[in-house]
Amino acid sequence: MIPAKFFSTAYLLLALSALLTASAREQPTCSWSACGEEIDPALKEFTYDVGDGPQTTMVYVEPDLATFYEKDGEKYKRVKPAFNGLAGKFINMSNKPYDQYWESYKGGTAHIMRRYAPFSAGGTGTFPTHRFFLSEPGTTDKRVKEWVVGNYPNNIYVYDPYKVEGDPEQTEKNLQANLNAEERVQYDLWTKTLLYNEQYFAFTGRSYLANYGVNGPRAPPMHYMWRADYFGQEHWVTTRETHFVTVPPEDKLGKIRQDLASERILKEEDPRILQEYRAVDEATQEPLQSMNMTLKVLSVAPRVFEIKNFLSRAEVDHILQVAAGVTLAESTTGDVGSDGDPSSRRSNKETKVRTSRNSWVPRERSAVLDAIYRRAADLTRIDEALLRFRGPDEYPELETKQPLAETLQLVHYDPKQEYTAHHDFGYSNIRDQTQGARFATVLFYLNDDMTGGETAFPRYVNGKSFHELKVKPEAGKAVLFYDQLPDGNMDDFSQHAAKPVIQGEKWLINLWIWDPLYERG
């Protein structure tokens, strides 16, 4: 568990945002120091009441579309995207487990999705008119709830067998007759979550996809979030982790011991690991002491950035060399962070949502991979120590020494393979006060000699086109996007897809960073 002081500090930062009005228009390009104290202007003060009296927090309200176009002078109207998918969150507010099924039409073939434990939640990417139902475990004949998905932003679908609409007295009798003390606590937390969602929805126009816990709504991210105020906006950040221009010999690349922990700390003035294999100054032939990375805003909502030349050719070659020595398995899809019973989740073979192959490459595999993690930490402005195993004196307030990032995922796509539109975040247990979830996704492209294979954001907000935003793979380029909003809610618009490869093959690696903790399954 994270101490309450951690959450209060995060909310204090949000409260300060209401006092700052400086516009990024005056400083279109931001450095580490220039933007170090900025607070997101899209956060607005919000008063709500879930039965404990009025309370105030800061929530994200999407800025006016006109601000997305820097000094354009044109008037834009929000374009409805051709893609009408959305995140569907399903909540079982009963004390019994149920299986969830999808059917293409009423009475059609039922496809198992997952089993929902008592008082659990889960979700999937879905579309309006999609039909789902809950049934007693092991059968499709004993349905207790049916849903037909509506249009965005109607994301949340609930099964509550105890509530009698318009009759709170009978509802209370049902609860007392059916739930024990612990079950009642969970039911009441879900009730507060739904009450908070109603008010959040009315204020922001979005569903609240996180949970309302004992300490209130989910805390805002503890990590830094780059601003995305308008298309084409640029930020730059400096890193000491310069490019490798030559792949070091294998005997110098050896695996790094995880138990070294704090001994792996590099001070600002320390030389980088294997500096002799890195870029040099053309004039002096001395090792470069730093390199700049430029983040360019491709999308404001969701926040998407491209970073060209994040990886060098030598680093790409090294990763592909590592790939040659690992076994790739069929990629799977998962309801990341969800708290239902995984035993009956649908298989990837049944749905064909994801048809690629993948494997996992740990940071400690080589010094080059370690340097890439360190550079990614600088890119996201997160201490690199949070992305590895830590020593006893590093971040004692977190009460865990586990990395807050997943192992790098190496992914390969052959022709016709794809990953249809999906979200990287999941849904937490109602009793989980930290609500750990994927915070940021960083994609690193390893080749560009293919046709197709773009990364697409089909629901990005804009005033010009109903087509999806497509990011073309370029060897060495990175793409950063956030799975969460600045107020701690999940960002439904972060839905993205890997478009089918038409010709050639596609290689990339994914890095997922969690907030506030990495909840391992």
Image (spheres, rainbow, N blue to C red):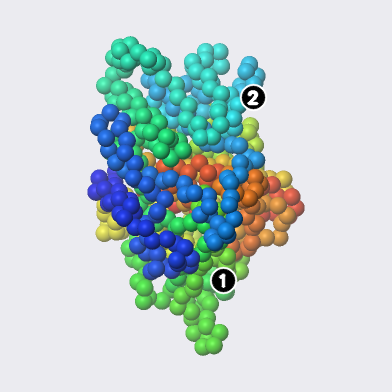
Badge 1 is on which residue?
247
Image quarter in which the C terminus is found: top left
Badge 2 is on which residue?
104
Badge 2: few (under 14), some or many (20 or more) residues near its Cα, within 10 Å? few
Q: Number of labelled discs?
A: 2
Q: Is residue 290 above or below residue 28?
A: below
Badge 1: few (under 14), some or many (20 or more) residues near its Cα, within 10 Å? some
Q: In terms of image quadrants, where is residue 418?
A: top right
Q: Is residue 452 left or right of residue 381?
A: right
Q: Amino acid at mark 2?
A: Ser
User: Which tag, 1 or 2, sits closer to the chain's start?
Assistant: 2
**Mark number displayed over residue 448:** none
Q: In terms of image quadrants, where is residue 175?
A: top left
In space, the residues marked 1 and 2 are separated at their CA atoms by 52 Å
Q: Is residue 320 above or below residue 282?
A: above
From the top left corner, tell me how far across and down residue 486 is, in percent: 41, 49
From the top left corner, tell me how far across and down residue 200 is, in percent: 39, 36
What residue do we see at 44% from left, 27% from top? Answer: 91
Q: Amino acid at mark 1?
A: Val
Given residues 489 and 42, the one toward you in this image is: 42
What residue do we see at 53% from left, 86% from top? Answer: 285
Image quarter in which the N terminus is found: top left
Q: Is residue 205 left or right of residue 501?
A: left
What residue do we see at 59% from left, 36% from top? Answer: 85
Residue 251 appears in the figure: no
In front: mark 1 or mark 2?
2
Q: Are marks 1 and 2 in contact (CB under 8 Å)?
A: no
Q: Secondary structure at mark 1?
A: loop
Q: Secondary structure at mark 2?
A: loop
From the top left corner, tell me how far across and down residue 69 is, in percent: 55, 57
What residue do we see at 61% from left, 69% from top? Answer: 313
